Image (cartoon, grey):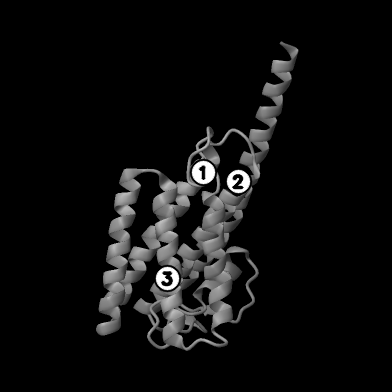
Amino acid sequence: MSIWEKEQDGHLRYGNWVMLALLAAFMLLLPMSRAFLPDHLEEILNRAIVFGVFIAATVWSGSRAFAAVFGLVLVASMCLTVMGMSQPGTVFAIAWHILMLGAFLLIAVGILKQVLATRRVRLNTVIGALDSYLLFGLAFAVLHSLIAVVDTDAYDGLLFAEGAVLAKNSTYYSFVTITTLGYGDILPLTETSRAAAYLEALFGQAFIAVIVARFVAMEVTHSAMSASDQEE
């Protein structure tokens, strides 16, 4: 069986693990690379990992329609990257953010649908839920960065490296918000940025509650069906 081949419950055998590795690289490798990489190389590494996530999602889906959509997303994001580097400007930055936001949400929803459709809670199912949670967090990071691009006074402490499109600490701010830690070193200052912050916090808590409830329900249902089969 291929590592991308679907199992009987619709899950991919190792696809969720590959996605988790790419997301971990995006969230952990990039911050650590800032200590020894110049800004332009860090931005190249950033784009390379994001493109890797898109390629992995295309292969993971097993759907021609999904593959076609992400093929277009990949080409469009590469074009925007090149145009943005040659002609820096707010228009290209906004277009790139909207494209990334839609892409991350599409992948997150696709993985979440597979997680919720499974009949048993396996390790791969848990990894899929974690992938989805991280992708939603990255989508909010892009949203916060987009708000900062449109309104430079929306946040206090959200920073952009030279030549970078995505705010360099928006991922940190997003996950501090979605987990409701709220250190206070980055502050939303406008109604829009504050709305994005509390919506993300509410979403993060609701996501965990729904996933835990679904996993418990799946295990209870499976246990009841197993007991019924044994009685027969």
What residue does disc 2 label? 124
Label 3 crowd (10 A; few <14 / some 14-19 / many >=20): few
Residue at point 60% right, 44% down?
125
Q: Residue at x 58, y 64 (%)?
A: 178
Question: Residue 72: which quarter of the image?
Answer: bottom left
Q: Earlier in the sequence, mark 1 or mark 3?
A: 1
- Specify the amino acid type for callout 3: Ala
Circle 3 residue: 48
Image position, residue 33 (x, y; %): 55, 81
> Which structural element holds mark 2?
helix
Q: Left of 134 or right of it: where is 222? A: right
**202 versus 215 height, above or below:** below
Q: CA distance from mark 2 to mark 1?
A: 8 Å
Distance between mark 1 and mark 3 Cα atoms: 23 Å
Amino acid carrying mark 1 in the image: Leu
Circle 2: is it few (<14), some (14-19), or many (20+) Cα within 10 Å?
Answer: some
Q: Which mark is residue 167?
A: none
Residue designated by label 1 = 12
Q: Amino acid at mark 2?
A: Asn
Indicate whether 12 appears above or below 181: above
Q: Where is residue 49 shown, x and y percent of the image?
A: 46, 68
Left or right of residue 142: residue 83: left
- Residue drawn at x 34%, y 66% is 98
